[in-house]
Structure formats: structure tokens, C-alpha cells
Image (cartoon, rainbow, N blue to C red):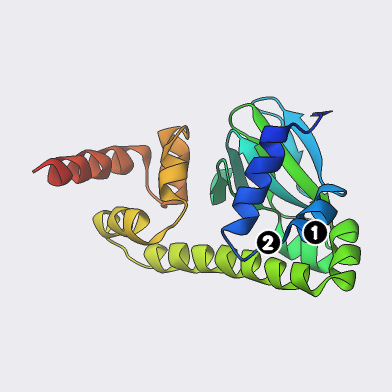
Amino acid sequence: MKSMTITKEDYQLLYDCLAQNAELSQHLFTSICTIVQKEFYQKGECLLKAGDISTRSCLVIKGVVHQFVYDIDETITTNITPQYLFFNSLKSYIEGSPSIEIHEAITDVELLYFEKQDIEELAKKDKELSYLLYKVHENILLDRENRMFLLQHRNPSKRYQLFHETVERSNWILDGTPDKYIASYLNMTPQQYSKEKRNYLLQKND
């Protein structure tokens, strides 16, 4: 992990990602830019270890982050966060409790982040930011609920279909994420995922 200088392109990406959630004034964005920071992680490097306390809200600007827990010796994917999306370990972030999640860079990753204390202090002073954060987290929760519903289906074909139809991040996940991680995200074996992917593409091209 290393700190990086934020570029004009990074600021523009941050603006675009925030503005798609709610109207964003230039005054507010200027304030947000005073507290944002940037880091780089190499492929395979941990962003958050089990037992750490999550104190950041992060935006991936390059690469893919894998969020997972261990069940005995099995890795269970809790989320995959590609470019243009926000993430943190929400329970740890809200409660200040040790995280059970592990966050790992499965590619080289660049991200922008806000420390919780900084963003909360700014939100106390600016109601516009409070509303923006509400809309950001509302969309994150909707995305998680859509995934929760698709995982209720025992049929792998239905899960794969709903992944494309209801999970907003699906197109971003598919761009640059190795299949084995997507299979875990959909609670499938790699073999099941390969089969459903092939069948879906065949039906789409008919």
C-alpha cells in the first residue's frame, strides 16, 4: 500500500460517481475534495484484515476488490467491488467493531477514500452532504438487497439471470473480475458458473 497524488481525472471520476446519486453543487464538491485521499494496493494485498476496524468509505477508481469471510477453511464472498463503486465493511464501520470481513485486491487497485471522522464532521456542517450520503448508502443497500434476493433461488440458472437483470454492479463486475470470484459471489462452483455463463450467452445470441 502506498499513498498517491490525486489527479484531475480522479477528481472528475469522484464527481461523476457522487453526482449519479444526487445533485452535487460545486461548493459541496470543493469541500469534499479537501478530505479525500488516495492509495494504491498491489494485487494480492489486503486492504482490511479480519479483526481490523473499518474507518474508511472507499471508492475504487481502478481494479477490483474482493470482500470475503472464512467459514472454517472455505472462502465465502460477501461482495465484489469494481471500478466506480463505493465499499467498506459496513458493520465494522458503523459499530466501530472488529471486522469479520477481509478486503483483498484481486488486481492492482487504486482507490479514493474518506476517513469516517472527516466525512462525519463535514456532514454536520452541510445538510447537502448528509442527503448525498443518504442517497449513496440507499443505492448500496438496494444493490445488496437485490443480491440477497437472487441468492434465495436454488436454481443456478435463475441466479445467473437475476445477476444480469437486477444487480446494478454486474456489468462492472464482469469487466476484469476472474470467473472464480464471480462464481463465489453467486454461490456457485466454478463449473456451475461456466455452464450458466455459456448457456446465457447462447440464449442471448439466439
Residue 151 rendering spot, x and y as whole percentages: 40, 62
Please tell me how crowded label 2 is: few (under 14), some (14-19), or many (20+) other residues with Cα within 10 Å: some
Residue nearer the viewer, 39 or 48: 39
- Closest to the observer: 160 or 70? 160
Q: In which quarter of the image is residue 140?
A: bottom right
Give how far across and how far down residue 109 sits, in percent: 66, 31
Q: Residue furthest front?
A: 26
Q: Name the residue under label 1.
A: 27
Instruction: Relative to 75, say whether 147 is above or below.
Output: below
Residue type at mark 2?
Answer: Leu
Residue found 82% across the figure and 46% down from its top: 36
**What is the tally of numbered marks visible in this picture?**
2
Taking the image as shown, residue 63 lies to the left or right of residue 185, namely right
Could you tell me the amino acid type at mark 1? His
Which residue is at a point 47% across and 32% down the rendered structure image?
A: 176
Residue 24, numbered circle: 2
| Residue 138 horizontal side relative to residue 36, left or right | left
Q: Report, in whole angstroms, how far the alpha carbon at label 1 lies from the one at label 2.
A: 8 Å
Element marked by disc 1:
helix
Q: Can residue 72 be seen in this view?
A: no
Left or right of residue 18: residue 26: right
Q: Residue at x 81, y 52 (%)?
A: 30
